[in-house]
Image (cartoon, rainbow, N blue to C red):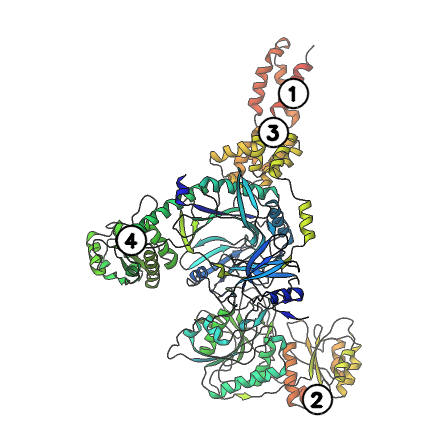
Amino acid sequence: MESWMGYSGFLLEMIRAAGVEIGDEIVVERPDGSSFRGLLMFKGELSAENIVVIKLGNGYNVGVAVDPSCRIRRVAPGRKPAFVRPPPPPPREGLPRVKIIGTGGTIASRVDYRTGAVRPAISSEDLVSLVPELSEIATVDAEVLLSVYSEDLTVREWGMIAEAVWRVLEKREFSGVILTHGTDTMHYTSAALSFALQRPPVPVILVGSQRSSDRPSSDAALNLIGATWAAARAPFAEVVVAMHAGHSDDAIAFHRGTRVVKMHTSSRSAFKSVNASPLAVLRGQDLTVLDEYNPRGGDGFSYEPGFSDRAALVKFYPGMSPEILEYLAERGMRGVVIEGTGLGHVARSWIPVVKALVDSGFFVGMASQCRFGRVNMRVYNTGRDLLRAGVVELGDLLPEVALVKLMWVLYRAQSLPDVSKMMITPVARELGARMLPEGVEPA
Amino acid sequence: MSIYEELGLKVGLEVHRQLDTRRKLFCGCSASPSEGSGPRLRITRYLRETQSELGEVDQAARFESRRMRRIVYEFSPASSCLVELDEEPPHPLNEEAVRIALTVALMLKARPVDEVHVMRKIVIDGSNTSGFQRTCMVALGGELSVDGLRVPIQTITLEEDAARIVRSDADEVVYDLSRLGIPLIEVSTAPVLNSPSEVTRTAEAIGRALRATRGVKRGLGSVRQDLNISIKGSGLMEVKGVQELELIPRVVEYEVRRLRHLLILIEELRSRGVRPEAVESQPIVDLTGVFEGSSSRVIRRKIGEGGVVLGLRLPGFAGLLKGEGDVRLGRELSEYAKAWGGVEGIFHSDELPGYGIGEEEVRAVRETLGAGERDAFVLVAGREQKAREALEAVRSRAAQAVYQIPDETRAALADGTTCYMRPRPGSARMYPETDIPPFPVSRELIEEIERSLPPPLESVAASLMKRFGLSSQLAWEVIDSEMLEEFEEIVRLGVSPSVVASILTEGLKQLRREGAPVENLTPAHIRGYFALVSRGATAKESALPVLAELAKNPSLTAEEAVERLGLKAPPLEEVVAFIEELVGAVPQDERRSAAGRLMGELMKRYRGRVDGALLNKLLMERLGAQRP
């Protein structure tokens, strides 16, 4: 059915017949003599079909039920809803230059009054206008590369993003690169960039926000300020994710791109380093570095683009049939990372299927669904039998990172032994040797 | 024609009241949080201005945003979750609250909307973690009859209560989150009220209509009135936060005095030929040099802290800042300076020399500013940036004083005066809350609520009179005491209705007069006390001392208070034994005539602990039992 600004059916016909545009002042007259006057507004998807949404003089929107016996009259033309960018602050001399590349997501989005949802819309320039503090830290140069929800990203976009960053790094004109990104899959992209942009000369910082930037309480401002500060001045040159460290607007954590996961659906401190500490934490102007890092200005930079989409991630659950692996292989997949239970297990019924697939050259790697800790498949019989069947133990690799790495490896290695070897060889600090206790009271 | 009619006084009233729902408006937290229970946590936030869907920035929002104060929220997980912390999207609109709001709407003959759309009303002073208050229009129109006067109702809205401010200074403001999210209903009248007493009576009538739903919270802090006040020739004053009915006429009278004075000033400034442009073009001048070694303690301290003294000439304003009584242009300017610059206050020429500032310094200031005898001046001491912002606000307000009284949002103070808070927000501060689906108000829902509308309070009063034999006055006092529910419950325990009614009304009033913090009493205290009375564990005569003790020590239970005061009834056997002893000591033939004296002795011993009627009955039984 035809729909315009959320309106359809007889109501849309009435609106058209009255010659009304969104934002016009209208009167809705009902046969019982009652009438409502206000501006015609966009209508959300969840509003009922016979409802006209009008904005009253006091700013409130209300839904008014209309049937064909009502009359809609245009009283005066209105202004269309629009976003006006505040004037950007004047640039300052002598500050580091920082590149901001927009890829979409909540941080670069505002409410879409057409659908009532949050949509990627505002540009990186808008962000600079909205967060004028950025211009006190660095001279910011912003461009929009993509404008997509992060759940819609694929290996193709990872490649585009990596290439865009590489071009910026090649110019050697910027002290750091910032990518604004949707948070849902930011940790996948950060892993992908970590493999594609190894030992970069300057920081490559992914930043997002959990509350859209058009909200007064958005975390976007502080996240951007923290990211810009680090892009301009941090000593580390790594691919990192910059997000709130806690519930307060007072600290930004920088997580290594291969060690970070989104751990909460909505909290501003959703991103956590897992099996590692954050690389650094910034409070005000005070940066605390917590781990070794690749320093700025090193000459070991290597650009290694390319990802294969023929890998999959499978989460095992009790009672799950191994057919899923056969299906994936039939659909052309070349390998799979299994999120196994505990130290790295699946049901014993999987063992013959795994063996047959590995024998045919299909990669099967094992990570754990425990979230924290390392897999070890030599403790129990099942693990030992899986290893004998050809499963590769993936150490303390996070399952998501293991998948991204497999996609990257499959693009560059053909034989199963090469794939297996590359999977367990550290590339971007994604594998660790030591696991430390957490939450222990100080002595 | 009354003076108020002559002045063209027009007041619109907004009555806000918390709803007594189980849950908050947009999350699963209890809507009756107890502040201070559970561990205390704190987080820090900042808020920024944003644009409405029409691309405008609200001036009230811009006002708060440019201050960029640190906002600290204190909370307990017992009463606040991630929704209050603005870390989780709101849950759908609480249906229980919508039903109560619709009940109010139907009782006031208002017209419900067909679909309720929740809006975000930008409020970035920190009182809402999100930077906006969620609010929705539930019904339009309606009317109320107030002593024969028909008062039109404009709107009935449902919104979330804001966080409670704990303390604030120029850099930081601290809020407690427990109140945030409690459903509030707002009933707004048209600006048709023409006198302070009309406003009070209307507030009272709306209060009664709300209470009739039995769905609103009671007690201090559950109700708040905002007043929209104007007189002919003035802007609109939105006075916020009048908590007590008694304050309403005083606030209205103060505003009328204030606005009249400002109107007179416009005439005076015009007749002096002062032009707004002449005020606007005055420079802000650094006078720190003049005040080196000043004998003013405040100024010395400010300069000592690295601050400056800035001055502004107000051409043609001489003698107009000191005003009359409690209304002064000087106070207006000072409030603007405090609000916009976060400074402690101003000095102005009408009050100088004074405050340690001497003749010599005044002369030097006048000379530096080029201020002649017909001019006034204003000084601000403090950090340069803040002092400058303060004087810019003073300059712009002074320029307006020549030709208009601007629209303002003001706060009601406990002394019945008001002070400037911020410019009045426009409709630009409203935009849709897209995280919450619209709530359909179906015909079926309206019919269902219509069928179960609660009786109006008039019939409640009639029923109290009929069922419990209360006088009309006592019945209305019980209703206005807002303890109708407790009253009915206690009477069911078997305590005499007139005793309960008079303790809950006259008794509590007496305690309040005597200075007891009666607002601390909870329904649990009152129910607990009368339960003891009904069990004979104490006598009704102990009511006032026990309730006073509970008011002073609200953490006690009624039983503990009774014990602490030694008002616990002794075991019945002990009382009987004592009566028998008394009676036994009186010769047989004197016993009849001794009844009065013996009763006196019993009351002396058991007053406040054992019910007098019970003592009398036991005594008469013993006297009679020993009759030959």
The residues tagged by marks 2 and 4 sit, at their Cα atoms, a distance apart of 93 Å
Please name which of the two marks, 3 or 4, marks the residue nearer to the observer. 4
Residue B232: x percent and y percent? 40, 48
| Disc on res. B617 | 1
Can residue A428 be seen here? The reply is: no
Residue under label 2: A416
Can residue B258 be seen here? The reply is: yes
Q: Are marks 2 and 1 in contact (CB under 8 Å)?
A: no
Q: In which quadrant of the rendered view does residue A247 lie?
A: bottom right
SS of the residue under disc 4 = helix
B525 to B295, vertically: above or below: above
Residue A221: x percent and y percent? 49, 69
Relative side of A343 to B609, left or right: right
Q: In which quadrant of the rendered view does residue A317 lie?
A: bottom right
The residues tagged by marks 3 and 2 sit, at their Cα atoms, a distance apart of 93 Å
The residues tagged by marks 1 and 3 sit, at their Cα atoms, a distance apart of 26 Å
SS of the residue under disc 1 = helix
Residue at mark 2 shares a chain with residue at mark 4: no
Please name which of the two marks, 4 or 1, marks the residue nearer to the observer. 4
Q: Nearer the viewer, residue A23 or B517?
A: A23
SS of the residue under disc 3 = loop
> Which chain is indicated by disc 1?
B
Q: Amino acid at mark 4?
A: Arg
| Disc on res. B270 | 4
Q: Residues within 10 Å of mark 4 (few under 14, many from 20)?
A: some
> Which chain is indicated by disc 2?
A
The residues tagged by marks 3 and 4 sit, at their Cα atoms, a distance apart of 63 Å
| Disc on res. B470 | 3
> Which chain is indicated by disc 3?
B
Please name which of the two marks, 3 or 2, marks the residue nearer to the observer. 3
Q: Which quarter of the rendered picture does the C terminus of chain B lie within?
A: top right
> Which chain is indicated by disc 4?
B
